[in-house]
Amino acid sequence: MENSILPIQRLYGLLTQEYENEKEEYRVETSKMSVGRKVKRGICWYPVVACRSYYNSLNQLVVEIKQTSPQDIDHHFEYGKPVVFFTTSNADQDGDSVKPTYLPHPCTISYVDGDRMVVVVPSSQFILDLQRCTTLGVQLYFDETSYRCMFHALNDVLKSKGNRLSELRDIFAGQHCTSHHTFNPQTFPWLNKSQERAVNEVLMSKDVWVVHGPPGTGKTTTLVEAIYETLKRETQVMVCAQSNMAVDWISEKLVDHGIPVLRIGNPTRVNDKMLSFTYERKFESHPDYPDLWRIRKMIRELREHRKKGESIHQKLSRLRDRANELEMRISSTLFDESRVVACTLVGSSSKLLVGKKFSTLFIDEAAQALEPACWIAIRRCHRVVLAGDHQQLPPTIKCYDAQKGGLGKTLMERIVEHVPSCVTMLTIQYRMNEQIMRFSSNWFYDGVVEASPSVKNRSLLDYDRSIEWIDTSSLPAVENDEESDSTTPDYKESFVGSNYGRINKSEAELTLKTLTNYIEKIGKQRFLDDRFDVGIISPYKVQTQYLRRLVSKRSEFKLFRSSISINTVDGFQGQERDIILISLVRSNDQGNIGFLNDLRRMNVAMTRARMKLIIIGDASTLCHHPFYRRLKTYIDLL
């Protein structure tokens, strides 16, 4: 059997490859890509203006940034990500011809909401520099911090010897046997049998447990129940996930369950409920905070108004000691009052958590997290519970060699492979009609997932097939929109560029025509009265952007726009809709289907639908692959 250190060493090498690749990609992106292109890709805001500045509750100097010409473009700015500011030599609003000059000192995002961003900056002089710029922009910077945290965690794992971290490393590699508590299983009447079994096995495990939750099987419900029951036996636990959005989701469910949560880092979904359990908001609400704020203000004023030759060292030292004492007291109170500390995996390296240890770590959406990121949090904990589904979206890997070498293989997959006795699969799903669910269950989950009786035969219309495939290979093309290329008379794909991939405008038109016909079949008034919702999914970003443009200007969708969501597969992860339409785009004579070969993405797309799933694509192209061939046969036989 392989030594448990060797996989970690390989992982370190693969992460190094990914790091170097992403760093080079950022360099090329920064030097060659126009500002306008960056804006469209969601990695840049331009133009922006620097507004008010202030010290936040963590005594960080921040400045508020606003877009002067807000655009309806999905962006990638979120809490904790590094950004860099730039100024330009002219005021071309499109940004296609401007030449950016980058300001020194990367900054960090503290808060994003709509067209407003709050950024932590290094000094007041930096703010003055921003305010002097006549044309200002901000773009994402290469994220050194996350990589540094992952490399540091892997080094700790490699060096660990004779401690709990080394034991977990060996257990995950199948080197050591796991151990369990022994007690009579508890009953939870509000859970189904597989969920109940999962909660009991989490409680019994001493080392590691995996809750494998296929789509719609109530993974979050089960995990929240497991956390709730664990807190009857332990004082405090840590809950992590790869993304801020996933942390927000599980945190909100825990708060709804009456569990005191301390959220490290700001939430993605900004509302009063989410903000109320963040560290910063709780810190500001503490009774000692006004005294701390007053002392911090005195320190700043002493420094700013210091007279030449005046000795203020002793006074500053006394004030700093008092401020540190108050900070520690407030922080200690916040952690003592909280039963759950929630943060992203990278966020678990926060200085706020220095010296903190937890009996149990729960990692949600573990199948989307890089293994090195998981080790950042595992170092703080005695045992680990992972929840997710490795048959859905994997981690994002940009370097082909790193992906081929196995960087995309998650810790959850490794445990499923090496310690299969520590896995519980949830088997009853509550989302999809039986017809929609069955193919996914058979292909990805060995047919063990079953539909709950409450959803098994649920449909929008009587005698309606819940899943259908509209094959474009034998259809005459619909009339394209006026902005379409009139020289493309069929459903063949077009190549847009390496960053956007493929587009199929005729298929987009057909997708919207199909949706219009189905809404009319349901009845427009019934559709509105019953508040049905629709998701339009495409694997390709440019196809989703084109579909959004078409929907925004078509009068027939005016009444229904708020009910229609259009996004990529990644954008729909964790969501569900009554009606899902999937535009597969690929149509060529060679049978090339690109990253539709990643069947986990198709699994995610198909399992978003509750009652109606419509797949639109060229069967003659897609059915070269056995998955799509069998899917087409399955649908035809219904």
Image (cartoon, rainbow, N blue to C red):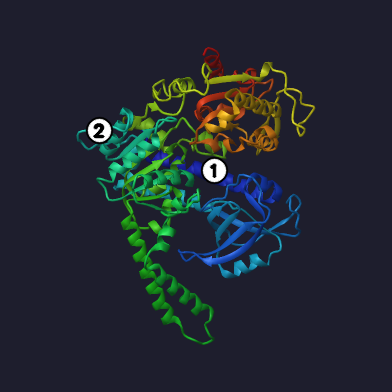
- Residue on which the image places disc 2: 187
Tell me residue 496's x, y (percent): 70, 35
* Front disc: 2 or 1: 2
Tell me the amino acid under the disc marked 2.
Thr
Tell me residue 475's x, y (percent): 69, 17
Count of numbered circles in the view: 2
Left or right of 188, for residue 393: right
Looking at marks 2 and 1 on the same chain, the residue that comes earlier in the sequence is marked by: 1
For image coordinates 62% across by 25% down, the residue present is 520
For image coordinates 46% across by 26% down, the residue present is 432
Distance between the Cα atoms at labels 2 and 1?
A: 46 Å
In-front residue for pair 11/447: 447
Left or right of 457, for residue 115: right
Evaluate whether residue 34 shows in this view.
no
Tell me the amino acid under the disc marked 1.
Glu
For image coordinates 68% across by 35% down, the residue present is 546
For image coordinates 40% across by 72% down, the residue present is 291
Specify the label residue 226 is tagged with: none
Q: Is residue 176 above or below residue 117?
A: above
Evaluate whether residue 327 shows in this view.
yes
Residue located farthest toward the top when viewing the structure as drawn: 637
- Residue on which the image places disc 1: 18
Residue located farthest toward the bottom when viewing the structure as drawn: 309
Q: Are marks 2 and 1 in contact (CB under 8 Å)?
A: no
Label 1 packing within 10 angstroms: few (<14), some (14-19), many (20+): many
